[in-house]
């Protein structure tokens, strides 16, 4: 059974940092294109960052460029999202996604709240 499980969310003050992790089971994360998405209340889910299959190319939404970094840990079979300089508008549920051989997998999401 293929699953993705996110962790690392929580409450943080503006300007703070969080590191999200997405643990994959049932498939090898190094053989998938992976990405992080988020959905704020009342808004559509949006792409935050994507990492290519080889890991050589990463793409970021303009609103997180320079603040967030996506990475893959093949040894742990995880995808990470380092989030720095967090803003209140970053508050959302964050989801990881993996695409392998045309099959799409989503995690259940982890809540990130940025508030003082």
Image: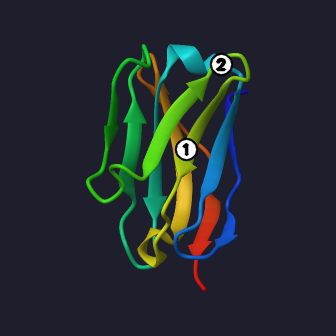
- Residue 54, compared with residue 89, is above or below; it is above
What residue is shown at x 68% (from left), y 23% (from top)? 77
Query: Is any part of residue 47 visible from this angle?
Result: yes
Task: Find residue 37 and report its horizontal and vertical position in percent.
Answer: 45, 51
What residue is shown at x 31% (from left), y 60% (from top)? 63
To which residue does mark 2 refer?
27
- Residue 5, compared with residue 76, is above or below; it is below
What residue is shown at x 60% (from left), y 59% (from top)? 17
**Residue 96 numbered tag:** none
To which residue does mark 1 refer?
81
What residue is shown at x 60% (from left), y 66% (from top)? 112
Distance (Cα) linking label 2 and label 1: 20 Å
Task: Find residue 115 and report its horizontal and vertical position in percent.
Answer: 58, 82
Task: Find residue 104 and report its horizontal and vertical position in percent.
Answer: 48, 32
When asked about the image quadrant of residue 116, the answer is bottom right
Along the horizontal axis of the image, is 116 left or right of 39?
A: right
Q: Secondary structure at mark 1?
A: strand
> Alpha-carbon neighbours of circle 1 within 10 Å: few (<14), some, or many (≥20)?
many
When asked about the image quadrant of residue 111, the answer is bottom right
Looking at the image, the residue that sits furthest to the bottom is 116
Along the horizontal axis of the image, is 72 left or right of 90?
A: right
Task: Find residue 34 and report its horizontal and vertical position in percent.
Answer: 47, 31
When asked about the image quadrant of residue 105, the answer is top right
**Residues at circles 2 and 1 in contact by the CB criterion of under 8 Å:** no
């Amino acid at each position: 059974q293929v699953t993705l499980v996110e962790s690392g969310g929580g409450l943080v003050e503006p300007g703070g940092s969080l590191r999200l992790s997405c643990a994959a089971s049932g498939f090898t994360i190094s053989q998938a294109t992976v990405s992080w998405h988020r959905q704020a209340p009342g808004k559509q889910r949006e792409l935050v960052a994507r990492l290519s299959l080889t890991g050589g190319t990463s793409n970021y939404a303009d609103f997180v460029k320079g603040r967030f970094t996506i990475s893959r840990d093949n040894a742990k079979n995880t995808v990470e999202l380092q989030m720095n300089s967090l803003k209140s508008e970053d508050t959302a549920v964050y989801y990881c996604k993996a695409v392998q051989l045309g099959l799409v997998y989503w995690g259940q999401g982890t809540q990130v709240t940025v508030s003082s």
